[in-house]
Image (cartoon, rainbow, N blue to C red):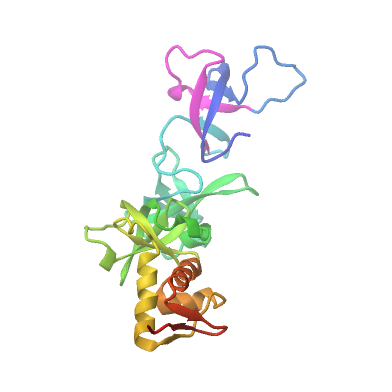
Amino acid sequence: MMKLGEFNALYINRFTPQGAYLVEHFQLEIDENSTVEEVLLPTKYLENGAKEGDPVSVFLMKDSENRRVAVTDQPLLTLDTCAILRIVEINPYGAFADWGLDKNLMIPFAEQRQAVEIGDTYPIFLKYDELTDRLFGSMKIRKHLIEAPESICNERVTFMVTEHHELGWRGIVNQCYSGMLYRSDCRIPVKIGQHITCYAKIVRPDGKIDLQMSAGTVDKYDEAVSMIWEYLSEHKFLFLTDKSEAVDIYNQFQLSKKTFKQAVGRLYKDRKIKLFEDKISRIDE
């Protein structure tokens, strides 16, 4: 099925004075009773010498008359991705941003986090409304992101900076997850809209990722083991166990429950701690 907001691999089916009509599967002979979904590629996007059956890669959008249309221009963002866009118009229906195509992208008032100004730039997510078969922009970035899996820890990721925070910068990790890069973990200049290659440090209980600029140690649990052992060396008892709530573990050590459990397992295997139902204690030699 042809998808709005994405690049589609289609074929030229027939030519008209307005351009070429494209289809998903080209057939030399088509049953006159069959219905084939077509989309227009306007003449200005056709290459010289184009002929029926030629494959084309096109981006699908809606024109000013709300008809599906194909273009070969490269937009600044595609479906379910985010980019920093400049507002070029505001009218009673919403704001409109330049996203690199002839028709500007509408951001309805309901999808704006704040009042916007013409000429200013904002992080915008491209979404699709199935009910109206239309693309729209959303400034409510976080509602479109999903919780990160534990398996992403220590992986190399792409971080898109979307806003400043008093402790660092918030943004989007791999166009899917919410992330935070702290100033203490970053030693390069950072600006809104920048794409930074960094590493997932931990996944918090709320599914958001804390990032760091360099790769972790060869064994990602070394730091967790050191933190827990240091605490026990000072306090004797730790009132957390592998059955504790993830949020309690994070509040104590800023560790995920999985990392905490594996670090505790290592300390137990090394015979450095004793496990109880409600606490952990160190073993004094």
| Observer able to see residue 148 | no
Looking at the image, which is closer to me, 153 or 242? 242
Q: Residue lying farthest right? A: 33
Q: Is residue 146 above or below residue 47?
A: below
Q: Is residue 161 above or below residue 105?
A: below
Which residue is found at the position 43% from the left and 58% from the top? 153
Highlighted range, magenta:
38-63
Which residue is found at the position 52% from the left and 57% from the top? 144
Q: Position of residue 211 (x, y in %)?
A: 36, 61
- Residue 69 appears left or right of 169: right
Q: Is residue 227 highlighted in magenta?
A: no
Q: Position of residue 90 (x, y in %)?
A: 42, 55
Q: Quadrant of the C terminus?
A: bottom left
Total number of numbered discs in the rendering: 0
Looking at the image, which is closer to me, 30 or 108? 30
Q: Position of residue 241 (x, y in %)?
A: 52, 78
Which residue is found at the position 46% from the left and 47% from the top? 105
Could you say which quadrant of the image residue 244 lies in?
Answer: bottom right
Q: Position of residue 136 (x, y in %)?
A: 52, 50
Q: Quadrant of the N terminus?
A: top right
Looking at the image, which is closer to me, 253 or 67? 253
Q: Is residue 88 above or below residue 50?
A: below
| Observer able to see residue 77 | yes
Q: Is residue 41 highlighted in magenta?
A: yes
